[in-house]
Image: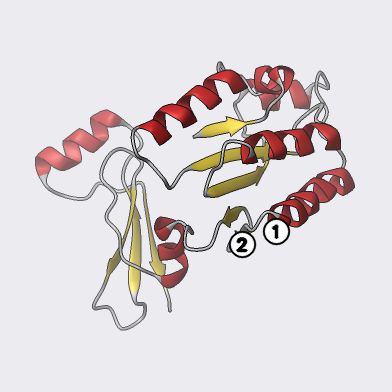
Amino acid sequence: LGMQALQPHLLQTLGRIHDFRQVEQSVHLAQAAGLRNLNLDLMFGLPGQTMEDWLATLDAACSLSPTHLSCYGLIPEDGTPLKHDLDIGILTLPDVDEERAMYDAAITRLAKLGFEQYELSNFALPGHACRHNLGYWRQTPYLGLGASASSMLCTDDARYSYIRRTNPASLANYFRMVKERHYALREEEPVSP
């Protein structure tokens, strides 16, 4: 579930339309439905975010008893309103040292709560690492279905073990590819061992 931050002003800066109360409700509904392995996505290095904000976000997330947390540093994407506001100086990002301190604080705080860091951005209680994430590192083949979905498939080519293919982003192009039963890929990349 995408929590991102505890503070309403930070969620608004990101263009999110939820608040923490809705995150709480969603978590409780998921748990009441029997889901026991639950991830929350969090973000640090946000415009206007302080270390106190970040620590409060971590504490609020942990209060919901997730088994997995993804803690992502913000990467402003071209073409987004957030990137535009950063480019023209309406918003500013925390400096690199502050962002690094937020990341380090997450590592320290989550370790004390029993979370193991198994990837740069991913922390899990023992036995709850995301199998999908681990599959990337272990080169487990996977099939992606849908527009913009990626697959990593075995190949007989002696030069590389796998090929990573990404479907077209456009729904029309994706549907055409499916109907005509041939790949009209947006991207294809060999993956060596």
Q: Residue 141, how many percent across, how many down?
A: 31, 65
From the top left corner, tell me how far across and down residue 4 is, in percent.
62, 32
Q: Are marks 1 and 2 in contact (CB under 8 Å)?
A: yes
- Say if 178 sits above or below 19 in the image: below
Tag 1: amino acid: Ala
Label number found at residue 111:
1
Which residue is farthest left? 180
Quarter of the view holding residue 178: top left
Quadrant location of the C terminus?
bottom left
Which residue corresponds to the image point at 54% horizontal and 26% vertical from the top-left? 24
Q: Residues within 10 Å of mark 2 (few under 14, many from 20)?
A: many
Residue 193 vertical placement versus 73 (above, below): below
Res. 46 visible in picture: yes
Residue name at image x 84 percent, y 34 percent: 52
Question: Is residue 74 in sight in this rendering?
Answer: no
> Does residue 39 appear to the left or right of 32 in the view shown?
right
Label 1 Cα neighbours within 10 Å, binned few <14 / some 14-19 / many ≥20: some
Q: In the rendered view, would you say 5 is above or below 114? A: above
The label number, if any, that marks residue 116 in the structure image: 2
Which residue occupies the foreground of this view, 132 or 193? 132
